[in-house]
Amino acid sequence: MSSVSLPLFKPWAPEWLIRATIFLMLLPALGVFALYFSNGAETTGYYGMEPADLQYSVVIMYAALVAFLPIDDRLVKYAKPRPYFLIAVTLNTLTCLICAGTRNLAVFMACRFVQGAVCALFCSICLHMIFSRLRSDRMRVIGYSVFYGTLQVSIPACAFFCSWILHYFEFNHLFYFLILAEIPGVILLLTITNNVRFRKKFPLYQLDWASYILYATMLCIAGYIFVYGQQLNWFSSPRLRWLLLIGTTSGLVLGLRQYALKRPLLELRLFRFTGFRNGLLLLIAYYTFKGTTGHVYAYLQGVLQIDPINLTPVWSSNILGIIMGMLVASRLVLNQTDTRWILGSGFLALLLFHVWMYFLFSREANTRHFLLPMWVQGYGTGALFVPIVMYVVSSVPAKMAGTVSFLGIAARYTGFCGSIAFANYFQLYARSIHYNKFREQFTGINPMRDDVLEQFRQHFLAGGKDMATARQLAEGAAQRMMQEQTALRASMDYYAWMIIGLSVLVTVIVAGPWVKQQVLRPRRAFTPY
């Protein structure tokens, strides 16, 4: 019997074991991707980097993933999944060992770029395994929900496990645990699968590596500008001006190549379809409004001084909300509910979360106050992704649907970077504005300042400090209070802009078609001659 005629999974393997194997194969990629979202202070302390460097380490991995996916789509059709997966595991293990042993920032960034490409290998193999077993459209909706739901849950779930690991182990042990997490998936893959391809061998001729290099260069430079732009005063910096020139040139050459090649890396002709363009804008908006929870976790850990291990209820609430949103959205999509109402309700949930959080920011709060808002945020996040993906895919002809995901993930990357840039703006610029305003008011001629300092002095004196020490500690406590208030005001401004943006978006989604119909109806009815 030829190897081509053999099924991928061995006949004796039960369905539950196949699903568990796919999940365990995907787990290392999810862990590497979500590793730094919950332990930024530990990461920056271990590598001696700035918070912006930490952000760029996530961005550069995301850029590598986005750029390598079109190449990987050709490779996964050519290679057998077992050796291909073993190559991915080997590269991931090597980069994890290097990250655990090095403190050099350049080496760390290079490893993150490689890990992004490896993450593309993991995801493509698992996606092909999932959809090779799904034949009907109904099952494909469920497959999208399960796969992308797992991706959405990975960040809070990884934060949950990382906080526990860091409570008992050193930071570099995280990488060793990630390496150990690869073992079950490898063993099960080799046990329950045959060494066959997903489909008939597809030759690798005309693999466009030049376009890949241009694409990766453009994405990495765009991410760098988004992350460091506010810190370097945007294009007042000669470095950013040169990077903009290089990135723009790479993008223009890339676009010209795609229209000239017979088998382009990216199918840019998809932009001819209005629905596709609108879908990409929705993806960008989704990732922009979804990425605001960083302010919540920074507030909980920075202002309220809550240890990450005690944030488990908050993360669990968010995970439950994502799962519930995915389940509800999948059912509505299968029932062929109007996409407009699904999207409107999802973005409305995110709007409710931002309004709720705007009024929760204060110097005194409890973890339980954030459980329901984080559930609402998770519900909105989970309810939106699959409907947006289905809307984008359905807006183009079936023969071109296979290349939609490459531009779709680029739109997600754009929204993710835009969210970081917007947050950095409020962290640096808006915070400095509020800090200066507080300093103007909190002066020696303001009687309130004396009252605050006296309260702090009495507090330290009651604790057994002498008068001189109590005065010094009171000054430091007042300074910290002013910094906390500055951070709170900057976060409130940030959420206020998010509220305005979400209000406009929900209005356009829900009322836009009706308004368009009312505007066009008189034009069609009016015939002057």
Image: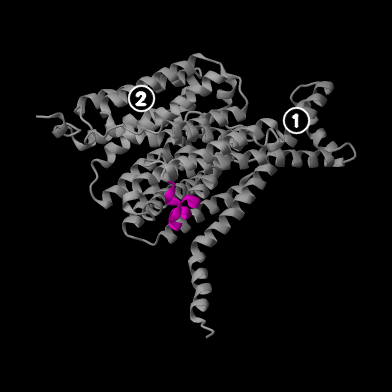
Mark 2 crowdedness (10 Å alpha carbons): few <14, some 14-19, many ≥20: some
State the image coordinates of residue 70 (x, y, percent, origin top left).
Answer: 39, 37
Q: Nearer the viewer, residue 3 or 248?
A: 248
State the image coordinates of residue 316 (x, y, percent, origin top left).
Answer: 45, 39
Tag 1: amino acid? Ala
SS assignment for the magenta stretch, majority? helix
Query: Which residue of the protein is positioned furthest toward the left in this rendering?
Result: 1
> Which segment is the magenta one?
268-282
Q: Quadrant of residue 397?
A: bottom left
Left or right placement of residue 100 versus residue 11 in this view: right
Q: CA distance from mark 2 to mark 1?
A: 51 Å
Which mark is first along the chain, 1 or 2? 2
Mark 1 crowdedness (10 Å alpha carbons): few <14, some 14-19, many ≥20: some
Q: Nearer the viewer, residue 307 or 152?
A: 152
State the image coordinates of residue 416 (x, y, percent, origin top left).
Answer: 53, 41
Tag 2: amino acid? Ala
Left or right placement of residue 390 versus residue 235 in this view: left
Mark 1 residue element: helix
Reading the image, the residue beneath label 2 is 88
Vertical placement of residue 328 versus 84, above or below: below
The number of callouts visible is: 2
Mark 2 residue element: helix
Residue occupying image coordinates x 27% and y 52%: 138
State the image coordinates of residue 375 (x, y, percent, origin top left).
Answer: 47, 46
Query: Which residue of the protein is positioned furthest toward the right in this rendering?
Result: 445
Residue occupying image coordinates x 15% and y 29%: 3
- The label shown at residue 477 is 1
Q: Nearer the viewer, residue 526 or 123?
A: 526
Vertical placement of residue 110 versus 20, above or below: above
